[in-house]
């Protein structure tokens, strides 16, 4: 099978509670460039009437993090802090000084920030105003070596993990939901 030529992430998109609150956090607090704010009166690509706004913030590498402000269809209890295992966004900074600058900027915002040294990266975690966990990472000096060593054994690690957890998953999710399609 030929590999699909995926170049990079253009953007990841999430629902936001309020475009202005989200703009404040990503532009004023984090310093990302507000790259676009588009309001629509119909669902793109359809004739379905729906009012929403789509906003984009540009990172230094030219990629974006984007949000949909759709107050008409947002569940009231949607915007609670998400478990990082369910969904989170990890963005990278160049140096530990940069990570400390972000930590300092966030010190006045009590949204439960914490730092973890994962060996290959050091990460600062915080929840944004929409309950999305953001992870700011800084690569360790030996990051590439650690990733190369892990890549060499990744297939074997998945195989062992699958053998240890398959029976529990079949009981929980069903055999057909675990098959490769």
Image (tube, rainbow, N blue to C red):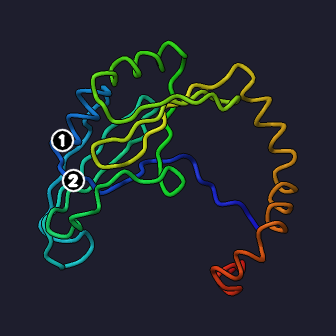
Q: Is residue 52 left or right of residue 120?
A: left
Looking at the image, residue 47 lies above or below residue 3? below
Tag 1, which secondary structure? helix
Q: Is residue 18 left or right of residue 85?
A: left
Looking at the image, residue 114 lies above or below residue 165? above
Q: Which residue occupies the extreme top position in the image?
A: 97
Q: Position of residue 66 (x, y in %)?
A: 33, 48
Classed neighbour count for the residue bearing mark 2: other residues with Cα under 10 Å, few (<14), some (14–19), many (≥20): many
Q: Nearer the viewer, residue 116 or 132?
A: 116
Q: Nearer the viewer, residue 70 or 167?
A: 167
Residue at (22% x, 71% y) in the render: 43
Q: Nearer the viewer, residue 85 or 149?
A: 85
Tag 2, which secondary structure? loop
Residue at (81% x, 37% y) in the render: 148
Q: Using the rendered view, name the quadrant where residue 57 is placed.
A: top left
Q: Is residue 90 left or right of residue 112?
A: right
Are circles 2 and 1 on residues that touch, CB within 8 Å?
yes
Q: Position of residue 72 (x, y in %)?
A: 14, 68
Residue at (47% x, 53% y) in the render: 83
Tell me the quadrant of the picture where the C terminus can be found. Answer: bottom right
| Residue under label 1 | 21
| Residue under label 2 | 17
Q: Nearer the viewer, residue 57 or 159?
A: 159
User: Could you give the CA–CA distance between mark 2 and mark 1, rounded to whole angstroms?
Assistant: 8 Å
Q: Using the rendered view, name the quadrant where residue 13 is placed.
A: bottom left
Looking at the image, residue 158 lies above or below residue 132? below
């Amino acid at each position: 099978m030929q590999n699909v030529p995926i170049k990079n992430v253009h953007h990841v998109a999430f629902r936001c509670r309020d475009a202005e609150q989200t703009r404040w956090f990503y532009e004023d607090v984090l310093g990302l460039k507000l790259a676009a704010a588009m309001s629509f009166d119909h669902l793109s690509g359809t004739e379905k009437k729906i009012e929403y706004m789509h906003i984009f913030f540009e990172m230094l590498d030219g990629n974006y993090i984007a949000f949909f402000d759709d107050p008409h269809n947002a569940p009231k209890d949607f915007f609670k802090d998400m478990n990082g295992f369910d969904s989170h966004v990890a963005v990278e900074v160049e140096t530990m000084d940069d990570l400390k600058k972000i930590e300092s900027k966030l010190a006045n915002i009590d949204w439960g920030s914490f730092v973890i040294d994962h060996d290959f990266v050091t990460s600062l975690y915080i929840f944004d105003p929409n309950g999305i966990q953001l992870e700011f990472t800084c690569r360790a000096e030996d990051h590439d070596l650690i990733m190369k060593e892990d890549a060499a054994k990744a297939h074997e690690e998945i195989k062992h993990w699958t053998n240890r957890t398959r029976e529990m998953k079949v009981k929980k999710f069903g055999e057909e939901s675990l098959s490769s399609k």
